Image (cartoon, helix red, strand yellow):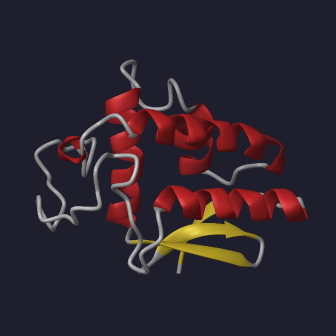
Amino acid sequence: MTVGLKAHYFWFPIGTGDFLHSFFSTISYNLEPNGWGTKYPVLLKSLYHEQLDKAQIPALQEELNNARELLMDIPPNKVIWDIEDLSKRPPWGDDISPEITSLGNYFVSSDSKQVFDIFLKAIETALQYDLDLRIHSM
């Protein structure tokens, strides 16, 4: 089952639920020393758990840009597959493309798109059409 972002009838596929959870887990574990959603509440509390109201989308964009910038300085071996079970590892292990140089560019969809770029495209679309945004499974 593919998980992605949905803004009304616009669909932005990302990957499996585990893969998307790893994206969120990596951000929280590496950038939020005080726990899940303490630095990025719109991303990790509002969007992760429910539909994000269109009024919160600019704050989401700011949080994502900040997280991406900070993750660019963290090596890819610091990826977290599941914040609830730190012993879990990505199914591909350490076998990653040499193009992946940091956690800022670690997450790539099955169709070779950066997950941060997918998020930002979904945000851009939601802003353009004045839509709410949510995580959705297809």
Q: Is residue 27 left or right of residue 46?
A: left
Query: Is 110 placed above or below 102 here?
Result: below
Q: Position of residue 101 (x, y in %)?
A: 28, 50
Split into 4 quadrants, where in the image is the N terminus? bottom left
Residue at the limit of the structure toward the front, as seen here: 99
- Could you tell whether 48 is left or right of 73 in the image? right
Q: Residue at x 75, y 46 (%)?
A: 57
Note whether residue 47 is visible: yes
Whether 2 is drawn above or below 94: the answer is below
Residue drawn at the location 54% of the way across and 69% of the way down: 4
Q: Quadrant of residue 123?
A: bottom right
- Find residue 70 and report its horizontal and vertical position in percent: 44, 32
**Where 134 falls versus 112 (above or below)?**
above
Q: Is residue 47 above or below residue 90?
A: above
Q: Residue 35 in the image: state x and y as whole percent.
A: 39, 25
Q: Position of residue 117 (x, y in %)?
A: 56, 60
Residue extending farthest to the top is: 34
Please name the residue shown 62% across and 51% down the image.
50
Residue 89 lies left or right of residue 65; in this view the side is left
Q: Is residue 133 visible from the viewing direction of this image?
A: no
Name which residue lies at 33% across and 53% down.
22
**Residue sitting nearer the eye, 114 or 57:** 114
Q: Quadrant of residue 126?
A: bottom right
